[in-house]
Every structure is written in C-alpha cells, then in structure tokens.
Amino acid sequence: MDPNTLALFQTLAQGLLTGGIYALIGTGLSLIFGVMRVINFAHGDFLAVGMFIALFLFQRFHLDPYLSLLIAAPLGFGLGYLVQRFLLARLGDRLESSSLLATLGLGLILSNGLLLGFGAQPQSINVAYATQTFKLGGVQISLPLLVAGLGTLLAIGLLNLFLYRTELGRAVRATAQNPLGAELQGVNTTWVQAVVFGLGVAFAVVAGVLLLPLLYAFPTVGENYTLKAFVVTVLGGLGNLPGAIVGGLILGIIESLGAYYLSNNYRDAYGLVVFLAVLLLRPEGLFGRTVKRV
Amino acid sequence: MKRTLLSLTTLLLAGAACAETINVGAITSLTGRFATFGKMQKAGFQVAIDEINAAGGVGGNKLALLLVDDASDTNKALSAAEKLLNQKVPLIIGSYSSGITKPLSQYMARQKVPLLVATAVDETITKPGNAYTFRVNNQSSVYSRSLLDLFKRMNDTKAGTIKTVAVLTSNDAFGKSVYTDVTTLFTKAGYQVVSKDTYDQGLTDFRPILNRYKALNPDAVLLASYEQDAVAVAKQVKEVGLAPKVIAGIATGFALPNFLDGAGSAADNMLVAMVWNPDVIYPGAQNLYARLKKALGGEEPSQHAAQSYAAMLAAAAAIKQGGSDPEKVREALTKISINTAFGPVKFRNYGGYQNQNAVVGLITQVQGGKFVTVAPATAAKGKLVMPKK
C-alpha cells in the first residue's frame, strides 16, 4: 500500500479508537441525563479523579493501571452513589438549575482537591506497554489505545446486559420513563437514581484510568472531556445510549480526519461545527426521538 | 523548611525597610500550567541569592528575593510587576514564558525600570526590544542555528543526509518564534520544509498529524512544545511508527528532566536543543548542578534553573554598581560582563538585537535516560548516535 493510503487508514483506526473513549465518557453522561435529567458538569472531573486514583496506586504500590480498575471502578461508583444520595437528591425539584449548579460546584471542588493533593504539574506514568504497538496490515496501532477501545466495548456491553437483562436494570428503565409511575409500582427510585449516578461516574473513572497510560494527569484535565462528552451526548441525542456511542465514534473520526487533511489548528472546531450543524438541523440529536429516554 | 522560614524572615525584614537588605523583584509562574518551570526558576534565584549573601552580599548589604507568582497568567504578571514597583525594587527578573514576558517587558519599559529576562526566548523580546529589557538567556533562533550546524556537519561527514524537515510547534509566542526561525532559516540554508504545522497547547492527540509526517517521510522532524505536550508528542511519534533520521525537540518541555521520566523509552536518541546541561564546559557547572539539585529537594534541575541563577548574578552585579536607582541599574546592566556557571553574561547590541546576551547553543541527545551534549564539537561530551534503520 502506498504511504498516503496507509497513513489514512492509520488515522481512521486511531480516530475510531479515540472515538471509543469519547463514547465511554459520553455514555456515562447520557445515562445520568436519561434517568435524572441532570447534566453532570463534573463528569470530566470524575474522569480526572480516575486518572489520579490510578496514578496514586501506581506511584505508591506499583499497581498496574489496568489492575487498578478493580479498585477505581468501585470507588467511582461509591463516590457517584454518595453524591446523588446525599447531595443531588436533597436538592429536590425546587429549581431546574440547582442540580446543574451543584455538579458545576462539585467539579470545582474535585479539581481543586486534586490540585491540593497532587500539585499542578502534569504527571505521567511509565509502564512498559505505554508506547507498545502492533501492526495490522501495515497499520500501526498503540496497545493502550486498543485496550481503551476494547475496554469501552466491554463496559458498554455490560451496561447493556444490566439494563435489559436484570431486574434492577428494568427498574432503571422504568425510572427513566416515568419516575412517579415507577415509584407507584414499588420501585425505590431514590436508590435507583443513586445507582445510576454511581454507574455514570464509574464510567468516567474507568475512562480516566484507561487514558492514563496514553496521556498524563493534571487536575484540570477533565475540562476538555466534559465538553467532549457533552458534544458526544448531544450528537447522539441526550439520554440516548446507542446515540452516545455512535456520537463518540463520529467525533473521534471527524477530529482525526480534519486534523489529517485540513489544519491541525482547528481540531476542536471540526467537532463543534458538526455539533452546531446537528443542533440546527436535528435538535433532538442524530438518533434521538423527541420523547425517547434511555 | 528552614530555608523557607529564613527567606520569610528576610522578606519580613525587607518589608520593614531594613537598611541592610536590597530587594530584588522576580516574577515567575509558581502555579498554573508553567508551574514546573517556575519551580526551576525559584531554585535558581535562591541558589544565587544564597551564594551572594554567603560571600558578604552586595557592597555589604544582603540581597532579599521578592518573588511573586503570576499563576501562568499575563494580567497577573502585570499586576505583580506593579506591586513590586510599589515596593521600589531596582529591577525585576521574569517571567517564565514568552507570552507573558513580552507584554511585561513593554510595561516595564514604560515604567522605566529594567527587566531581566532569564528564560523566555521569543525573538521579538529583544528584537527590536527596548532600552530597559535585558535578556540573559538566548533568543529562540539559537536553537535552530545549532541544529543547522549539526545537520551541516552530518551532511559533510556523511553521518546521515538531512535534506527535508517537518516542523510542529505549539501555537503561542514561543512556538511561533521557533516556527518562524525554522521556516526562514532552514529554507535559507537550502533545506526543504515539507510540512509546517502548529497546534493549540494542551492537545492530547497528535496522531493524525504524525501520520501525515509518516507519509511525507522527512529526514528530520522538529518539535517545540511545553511540558505535557512534549511527553504526549514524543510518545505518539513512537506509537504511529514515525522514524525519521532525526527527531529534535527545541528546549522548553523537552529540556525538562520530567520529560525523560514521562516519555521513557520514547525519548531515546531524541535530540534536544538547549543552552545549559550539567555537562557544559563552563567552570563551576557541576557544582551549580549539585546546589540546584539540593535546592529542588533532590529533583534534577533543568536549564531554566541555571538561566535564573545567572540572571540573579547579573542583577546583583548591576545593583552593586547602580545601587537602588533603576536608571543607574539600567546603565550598569549595559556595562556588566560576568562569568557564571551558566556561561558568560554580557548584554550587547548586534544583528538587530538589543541588550541580548550571546549564548552558545547546545544539542544534546537522550542517551541512557540522560541528556548528553553531542554538539557543537567544542562542547561535546558524547557521540551522536544515529537511529538504527
């Protein structure tokens, strides 16, 4: 294959995998929105928390980041559970914006807490496989990037099983469709909502851990990802899980192809242009039906 | 801790207008995205102050460091300068980055108080510059020129033929300055610049652009990035399988010991252009390295610490002659000529530059997890290793 075609395929493959990570982040955000109608503005900061958990475990106990998922994911779930149970649930329905502002404030607390604990300098870990690659028909793919892509697939697959194959999953879907109705049918919606928020945060934390071998951690690393998650979610339709996945993949590919063919300088702009176009032409999102939730 | 307490006490004494201390103002980025560089600068300042005071101070007076954090923000740097000027400092050293230092130099010129630049390399800070701005460190083109010298030597000795280059820089004052240097100087020297690109600082995915470079297959890839970007781009160069004859990083993020830790094996054999490395030939360099390392609590110092050290020595030399009057200090600065472990410091007007110290550029190569100086021939401590094809 000539070098140009090869480079294009490589860019496409990497864009797809990067998009997979966006999808993982976007799914968490979309799940929370779908059930609670809350836009979690601290989503990116939870991702940063995930990165720092893995960083800390690696630096202190030399724990491999992928192994630290076993600790980080439950921690993330617990953190999200507590946040919903003792913070967001207590705000009530008095103001639409109160939960939005609460998550925004929570994000600030998280990122500044990380700043206090770990300092402002970017930190990265150096594992043997961080720069390992393998070749597939001439296309060179990074191992940690592929693991991140596969991790996304696994996480989303598990979420799907949970939502459609378990009793609790049914309760989640019921709560998403009509909280009052679910409550009347005997679903403990307060608990379900806390579980959902925990799951959403766990997704962000897992994404953070998967990103660590590829990137570097610093306290405000999440800002960019909150924005990306938001774009992904709106692309696919707010609260629409398959939409969030496709939205993530689309964003990853658009960014990569834009940076490859056009100028690298406007990388973030390509995604945002598509975002605006979707808002103008299909405000319910590419795959959204106006009433569909979860 | 003891040192912090000590400097706090000196600060307090200084605040009480003690007749026996002279305040030297300094601004750097102790927090924010340039925090690592700020930490290096602080260590350099402190080592110099300790050295001067241990040797009896300046004309019998002790020097005290008034260091203000600009939080990596231009507006905060300007208000920090105002604050320091209200405390009647005879000069200010700072800040770290080019983007902050350029406006700071213009502000200081209006206030008619000298600014000593220790780390920022943007060409336009001293070209044309102004009467109140003095740069201890090099201008950015020094890096490109030393790379050009090395490439010429490689081409002459057939060590490796370099004809085409691609350049990727961050999209800020420093990056743009390097971008202009490379695109003009390399083109003038007969090299073909096959791709020239910039990116927004903080970009995490360089893969598409590196894939493009891979297809273009240039002989050399030149990079200019701050801290975290340097690690990300170096890792991804390896990840996409981009393997030109030469990959060179222009100082800054690549010249940090952090970079070696973060990039790990991805940094192997990379060239890094800089102006100071512990293995330089200037007398006292090893000793300075040890003292800086101690001031950093055991962390490896970078060239930014050495540059700041030299700037503080230059400040002390000027204050010795000019006292506390900014105008007299400015006059003294135009005349000083000192030798430091960073190299000689003498401000001259040449080639369109004003009050610019002439600094010898070094090319180091990452060998065995360390920067080893490989060029110029007069300063080389190791041999250039070409990548195995």
Image (tube, helix red, strand yellow):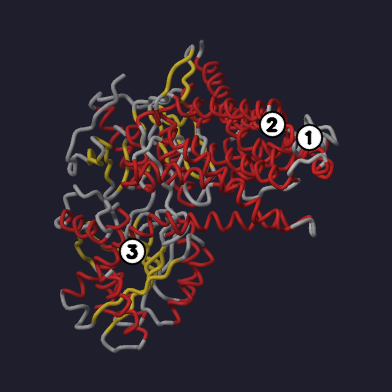
Q: Could you say whether the residue bearing mark 3 is in a helix, strand or loop? A: helix
Disc 3: which residue: B42
Query: Disc 2 versus disc 3: distance between alpha carbons?
Result: 46 Å
Rendered location of residue A160, percent (x, y): 67, 27
Question: Badge 2: how crowded within 10 Å, few (<14), some, or many (20+)?
Answer: many
Image quarter of residue A105? bottom right
Marks 1, 2 in one chain? yes
Residue type at tag 2: Gly
Q: Nearer the viewer, mark 3 or mark 1?
A: 1
Q: Is residue B83 visible?
A: yes
On the image, the x and y values in percent for residue A219 come to 50, 52
Measure how far apart labels 3 and 1 are at the Cα level. Answer: 51 Å
Amino acid type indicated by mark 1: Gly
Q: Earlier in the sequence, mark 1 or mark 2?
A: 2
* Image quarter in which the C terminus of chain B is found: top left
Q: Circles 2 and 3: CB distance less than 8 Å?
A: no
Density class for disc 1 (Cα within 10 Å; few <14, some 14-19, many ≥20) is: many
Q: Is mark 1 in CB contact (under 8 Å) with mark 2?
A: yes
Q: Chain of mark 1?
A: A
Instruction: Please give left or right for residue A54 compared with residue B8 in the image.
Output: right
Q: Quadrant of residue A230?
A: top right
Q: Badge 3 sits on which subunit?
A: B
* Local secondary structure at mark 2: helix
Q: Position of residue B83 (x, y in %)?
A: 47, 77
Position of B177 with respect to A196 (left or right) is left
Tell me the subunit letter for badge 2. Answer: A
Same chain under badges 3 and 1? The reply is no
The residue singled out by tag 2 in the image is A247
What numbered label is drawn on residue A285? 1
Specify the amino acid type for callout 3: Lys
